[in-house]
Amino acid sequence: MLVITTNTELNSFLGTIKKKLNLGLVPTMGALHSGHISLVKKAINENDYVVVSIFVNPTQFNNKEDLEKYPQNLDEDINLLYTVSDKIIIYAPPVSEVYQNKIAPKKFNFQGLDLVMEGEFRDDHFDGVGTIVEMLLNLIKPNNAYFGEKDFQQLQIIKKLTEIQNIPVNIIGCPIVREPHGLAMSSRNERLPSQIRKEASIIYNTLKAAKEKFGTKSAKVIKEWVIKTINDNPNFKVEYIEISDVQTLQPVIRKQKGKKYRAFIAAYTVDVRLIDNIALN
Ligand code: PAF
């Protein structure tokens, strides 16, 4: 398995393989878990080679402490990927290779997709995501790029990014992978004490119950119920719960026939912020 840390090295390697072959990209921030591995396996099945990027992108963190505490273990990630396939190329650049002297995000117009939910609570987050993903897509020029639906808003924004920046690539969304108790897999879960990690199933269980209610109850009633149910557990605090159109990501006022909706949630437990979502219809 090849581990590459500079753009020049990556370019010269891609020059030797690209011609007629299909290339997949799985962008990650490392601390790999089964959710990432499910993306990598899908990418391997659908491409001749797969680049897995491992880069903790500073410009998408609105909170300095979250960046400092973000789990990093490159050696473990490399060892794990080594067990998956020999068709993987790891691209793990240092911050200086990506941002040279200026660690700042580019500004994008995501046509409102970035102004709600995560965008409302995390200033500049999606500009930071757009900056790194655009750079990776332009550098690697994959045929297909894979993103998890746990970050569903990010997935829709990356689709918009490729449209507004004219980047020729298929953006492929992959289902959420969950821990045995139901918590959506995330690198941040490593920071949870084991009891809280089990109790965090309250988030997914509440979303599943919200889905049951969606046929008969209004979005307002469901959202109030979700907040009360989760906040009744003193270990958890809802930051937002939203029921939104999957295309526009705008909150539903009145449900419309033929439209698809999802419930989106962010909640704090100890000092870790967890997000999740579920398709409602
Ligand atoms: O979803 C993530 O891990 C990150 O936001 C991504 C897409 C790798 C960009 O840094």
Image (spheres, rainbow, N blue to C red):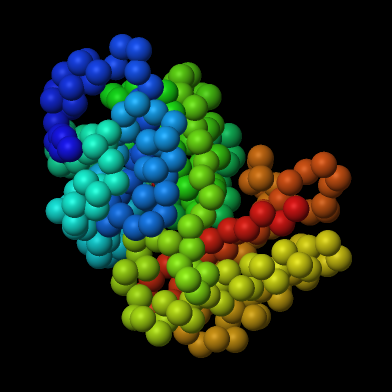
Number of numbered tags placed on the structure image: 0
- Identity of the residue furthest to the top in this view: 19
Image quadrant in which you'd find residue 68: bottom left
User: Along the line of sight, which residue is nearer the eye, 271 or 147?
Assistant: 147
Report which quarter residue 143 is drawn in.
top left
Residue drawn 56% across the image and 55% down it: 117
Can residue 276 be seen at all in this image of the molecule? yes
Which residue corresponds to the image point at 72% horizontal and 64% vertical from the top-left? 211
Image side of residue 149 versus residue 11, left or right: right
Q: Establish if 232 lies above or below 209.
A: below
Q: Quadrant of the N terminus?
A: top left
Q: Is residue 42 above or below residue 228?
A: above
The image shows residue 39 at horizontal and vertical percentages of 42, 45
Between 133 and 148, the residue placed more toward the observer is 148
- Name the side, left or right, on which 117 lies relative to 179: right
Can residue 104 be seen? no
Say if 187 sits above or below 206 in the image. Answer: above
Q: Image point 30% across, 63% down: which residue?
A: 66
The picture places residue 86, in percent across and down from the top left corner, at 24, 37
Residue at coordinates 19% horizontally, 41% vertically from top-left? 92
| Relative image position of residue 123 (x, y in whole percent) | 43, 51
Residue 202 position within the rendered picture, expressed as x and y whole percent measured from the top left: 56, 77
Quadrant of residue 271 in the image? bottom left
